[in-house]
Amino acid sequence: MHSNRYTILFTMFTTMILAFVLSSVYSNLEEQTQRNVQADIKKNILSSLGFTPEKGKPWTTENVEKIFKSSVTSFVVDKNGNVIPDMLPEDIDPKVTTNAYPLYKKMNDGKVDGFAIPISGKGLWGTMYGYFAIEPDGATAKGITFYKHIETPGLGAEVDKPWFQQNYIGKKFIDENGVLIGIQTVKGKVDQSSPEAYHQVDGISGATITSRGLNEFLLKDLKIYDAYLKQIRKNYNS
């Protein structure tokens, strides 16, 4: 029979080995998870900007990285609309960085073909995260996507369905005087004869609180970028 000392040492040695193995596995999985999360975010940015995978060829992480690198320029602006030099979105630490906001610009044959900004805010059950894309005129919605939320399936969760997101395309978020007003999800169908129809989209049945939250945080986030977008509108119309 082994002595108590042998048993204790064997148990300690085995525990140390298992702890090391588990730590290594966790570290590798965490790195892979973070890569997948970043790829999913980039995929949503691309989707909001109008990129779609080829038929029968779903996007892979490698595809997303390649398209993003070749077609999207990432930079950071402050609330006054100034581009912050030598700073990228990944440099922003929400815990310590202030007055720095990520922005993504789609390029096509050397020309600007849209912008994308992150959006987030409270729905019914929790925070919703997504991206809102803007046409080169700085005034018109190009697309919207959501990559994370906990809204009710069949109700508020419809925000991540194509039928709902496509409603935003072509809608204006400023009025005829250039004042930021956002885009409003209405109850039921938009009355196309209404003078307000240009900045309204069809609502989701049974998801009033989710829709109201989306209206509020989309406007809130657009305000953050309003100074920069005013410059875009001015240059676009000059």
Image: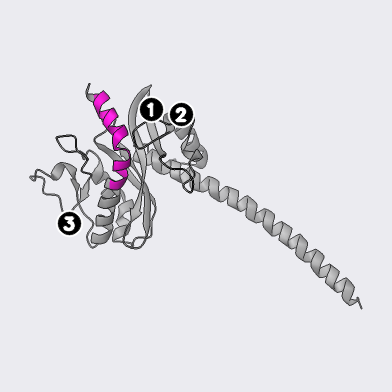
Q: Residue lying farthest left?
A: 193
Q: Which residue is mark 1?
A: 107
First in sequence: mark 3 vs mark 1:
1
Is 94 located above or below residue 73 in the figure? below
Q: Quick check: is 140 in the magenta stretch?
A: no
The part of the chain drawn in magenta is 220-236
Who's the residue at 23% across and 63% down the image?
Answer: 206
Q: Quick check: is 229 in the magenta stretch?
A: yes
State whether residue 221 appears in this view: yes
Q: Mark 2–mark 3 contact, CB under 8 Å?
A: no
First in sequence: mark 1 vs mark 2:
2
41 relative to 180 in the view: left or right: right
Q: Which residue is mark 2?
A: 85
Q: CA distance from mark 3 to mark 1?
A: 36 Å
Q: Which quarter of the image is occupied by the C terminus? A: top left
Majority SS type along the magenta span: helix
Q: Secondary structure at mark 3?
A: loop
**Which colouring convention does the figure follow?**
one colour
Q: Which quarter of the image is occupied by the N terminus? A: bottom right
Who's the residue at 16% across and 41% down the image?
Answer: 198
> 10 Å neighbourhood of mark 2: few (<14), some, or many (≥20)?
few
Q: CA distance from mark 2 to mark 3?
A: 43 Å
Q: Amino acid at mark 2?
A: Pro
Q: Mark 3–mark 1 contact, CB under 8 Å?
A: no
First in sequence: mark 2 vs mark 3:
2
Q: Which residue is mark 3?
A: 187
Q: Mark 1 or mark 2: which is in front?
A: 2
Q: Mark 2 or mark 3: which is in front?
A: 2
How far across and down, in percent of the image, does residue 54 sit? 40, 37
